[in-house]
Image: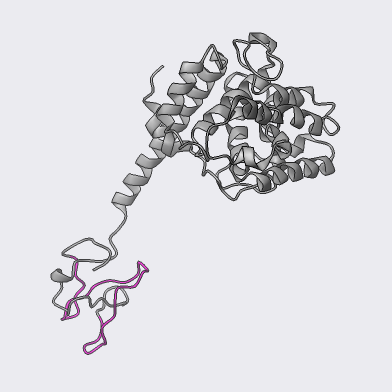
Amino acid sequence: MRLSCGAAMDNAMTGKSGGSATASETPSGGWVNLNQVARGLKDRTLARALASLVEAVGAKDRYTQGHSLRVARYAAAIAKELGLSKVECREIALAAELHDVGKIGVPDELLHKPGALSAAERIRVLEHTLIGERILAPLLGDRPVILAAVRWHHERIDGRGYPDGLKGEEIPLAARIVAVADAFDAMKTARPYRKSLSGRMAIAELLRGSGAQFDPRCVGALLAVLRRWATRQAARSSVASKFRSRRPAIGVRCEALSWPRASVFRGPGGTGPPRGSPKMSLPAAGNCMPWHRDGRLCRSVALPARC
């Protein structure tokens, strides 16, 4: 697959890392959050409890705050691209937003360690999948898809993942979707031990791990989504550029006026300022027009807006 969508995708759909949006708030431009997903939950108290859990993890690990929302957006888009129903997409989005809840049981010194983790430390961090399942089981015991995604989103297609070494189709589809969405956003987010990757590099890593670490279907679905988002963003930018180029000018170059430099007057259409009026600087509003000394409206030069 082509990687040309990487650069455009950076501007099209990159979330703001470490943003202030939380699970109980709607992030600017966000696709889904717990309040929206909770429409599928009969118990609003349960929705608030889940939101509180995500909020607690975000308070413990600042990186997790915006990360969970972005992963939920990617995961829902992948599920939709794969042809899953709206109910399934919503459930996978909720699973993606809750996938890191278990980090509340991981020591801070491991989450914020500036260097690379040792093998033992990495296993300790990966235990957040099991901790998250245990935390959510009493609340979501009737939602096996969500619990499966939380437990197995660090499994690998080749069977070398954590915690159970599941292989291929043994890994639930929801977990495979969350794994791709989680890895993509993690690569594009700066961490204490490494810098963030560009969109092009993150896509290259997904393709490199496709078939070994990641489900090729899920990787292909995400790339299709990113290309579509990048195309839409490019179209919007083109329309905005054309609109900006057609806007009427709100000022002229001072050299084109016989009036003293930087003297621009606010006046009604068709009549100039009275002689002897004090000088005025260019207002921010667009209802000001430049005038010649003899009171005629100057139309000789368009732009720039400020002198």
Which quadrant would residue 92 be assigned to in this image?
top right
The secondary structure that dominates the magenta segment is loop
Q: Position of residue 16 (x, y in %)?
A: 51, 44
The picture places residue 95, in percent across and down from the top left corner, at 70, 30
Q: Toward the viewer: 23 or 42?
A: 23
Q: Quadrant of residue 165?
A: top right
Residue at point 30%, 73% (across, down):
282
Q: Tell me which segment is drawn in magenta.
A: 273-299
Judged left or right of residue 19, residue 285 is left
| Residue name at image x 22 percent, y 66 percent | 252
In screen coordinates, is 146 left or right of 205? right
In-front residue for pair 194/36: 194
Q: Position of residue 132 (x, y in %)?
A: 75, 32
Instruction: Tell me the residue at 66%/27% (across/down).
Output: 126
Residue 90 image position (x, y, % from top left): 69, 30
What residue is drawn where x is 63% and y is 17%?
161
Residue lying furthest bottom: 276
Colour setting:
one colour
Residue 227 visible in this rendered orientation of the protein: no
- The answer to whether residue 122 is above or below residue 60 is above
Image position of 12 (left or right of 59): left
Q: Is residue 290 magenta?
A: yes
Which image quadrant for residue 109? top right
Quadrant where the C terminus is found in the figure: bottom left
Quarter of the image containing the N terminus?
Answer: top left
> Residue 294 colored magenta?
yes
- Asked if residue 229 shows in the view, the reply is yes
In this view of the protein, which residue sits in the foreground, 306 or 294? 306
